[in-house]
Amino acid sequence: MYAQMIKTAGTGVKSREEMTEQERAFQDKIDADIKIEPKDWMPDDYRATLIRQIGQHAHSEIVGQLPEGNWITRAPTLERKAILLAKVQDEAGHGLYLYCAAETLGVSRDELTEMLLDGRMKYSSIFNYPTLNWADIGAVGWLVDGAAIMNQVPLQRTSYGPYSRAMIRICKEESFHQRQGYDAIRKMAEGTPEQRKMAQDALNRFWYPSLMMFGPSDKDSVHSAQSMAWKIKINTNDELRQKFVDQTVPQAEYLGLTIPDPDLKWNEERGHYDFTQPDWSEFFDVIKGNGPCNTDRLAARNKAWDDGKWVRDGLLEHARKKRARKVAAE
Amino acid sequence: MKNEWPLWEIFIRGQHGMSHRHVGSLHAPDAEMAIKNARDVYTRRNEGVSIWVVEANNITASSPSDKGPLYEPSESKVYRHPTFFDIPEEVGAM
């Protein structure tokens, strides 16, 4: 889950009477769980919202490589290095699957990239936090990928065929990400007192930013209803956040680590944990561009794009020349 | 001139003697690079033993609005299925 605060295009959910005949047929298909495919008719607002959502999701996968890439050369063992390298490579793959899904809606890959680079499109707030030490890499896999899975598993059932298929591929690989993270942080939690302290410190810093990944509370998510009717959003933000907390608390207990929330407690009546909401003013501030790493992340993506230009152009030119030579020989 | 790499559709044969199956798409400057990229993007966990790449604009697809004329005629031809015919039990498996 890497899409947050997606503004749903349009004017909200229409009643059946307000819909045109085409819109009614479209909604009937969605209600019957029939997938919408690229060449099928779809409302312009559905298309626009999906481009925003899938695009932001793709950007998050790509920018998400940066905090982890930071530790590839400094992983504590060769095995951890190989694992982290494989994980970061997966994230590039996930970005690609999603860009391709977005492209079926009529936007080009380069257009999407340019919108990320000039700030018109966003990526998940979580990647604007730094990874300060090796324990953070464990915490990212365990918590950040754990939160991502919460959202991505239901999205496998989303109404748009290419998006659904991309999510199915991604979910297959994502479980490796969370497990390697938990394994890495477990090693530290069970290690020396210093390592234990680092593991606790990483949990302290990543807990609330991970809760923010699900986006603002339902009462502040004005656009959810239409996206849910279109089945491009399956659960509400608060539902998923609760599920994440319920799942993660016992995992932290197993490690002997403490969730940095003094008010966290099991609520017998609800059958869920009660917990403290993250600081939403911090969230909106990070989204606006004022997080610890926003500037670095965008600068790194822009540099990669600019520095890679001669390679992209060169390979294309080489392909053109080769084709011309072949035609000449025939 | 727009310098965007063309889009390629990727087909992969899985391990089990199956036909090539569409798995997704990617951008690459030429067919050779498309195969290299497909290997990295779509077969990182032994998902395939063979790759086909086809430039996307070489694919002609049927239109969703042709669904009726294309597929409806076969709906009334139930005799094309083996289950249409009753075979006496005494005859045995057929």
Image: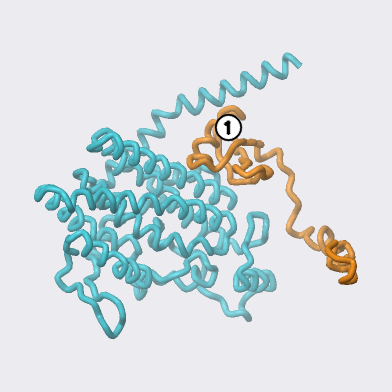
* Residue nearer the viewer, A264 or A83: A83
Please give the residue where the numbered disc 1 appears in the rendered image. Answer: B35
- Which residue lies at the image location 56% right of the left edge and 59% below the top edge? A47
* Residue nearer the viewer, A279 or A132: A132
* Residue found at the very far top of the displayed protein: A329
Whether residue B23 can be seen here: yes
Whether residue B2 can be seen here: no
Using a 10 Å C-alpha cutoff, classify the residue at mark 1 as few (fewer than 14 neighbours), some (14 to 19) or many (20 or more).
many
- Which residue lies at the image location 39% right of the left edge and 56% below the top edge? A2
The colour one sees for chain B in the rendered image is orange
Position of residue B27 relative to residue A325, above or below, is below
| Chain to which the residue tagged by mark 1 belongs | B
Q: Quadrant of residue A282?
A: bottom left
The colour one sees for chain A in the rendered image is cyan
- Which residue lies at the image location 45% right of the left edge and 61% below the top edge? A153
Position of residue A300 relative to residue A141, above or below, is above
Quadrant (top left, top right, bottom left, bottom right) of the C terminus of chain A: top right
Direction from residue A219 to residue A194 in the image, left or right = left
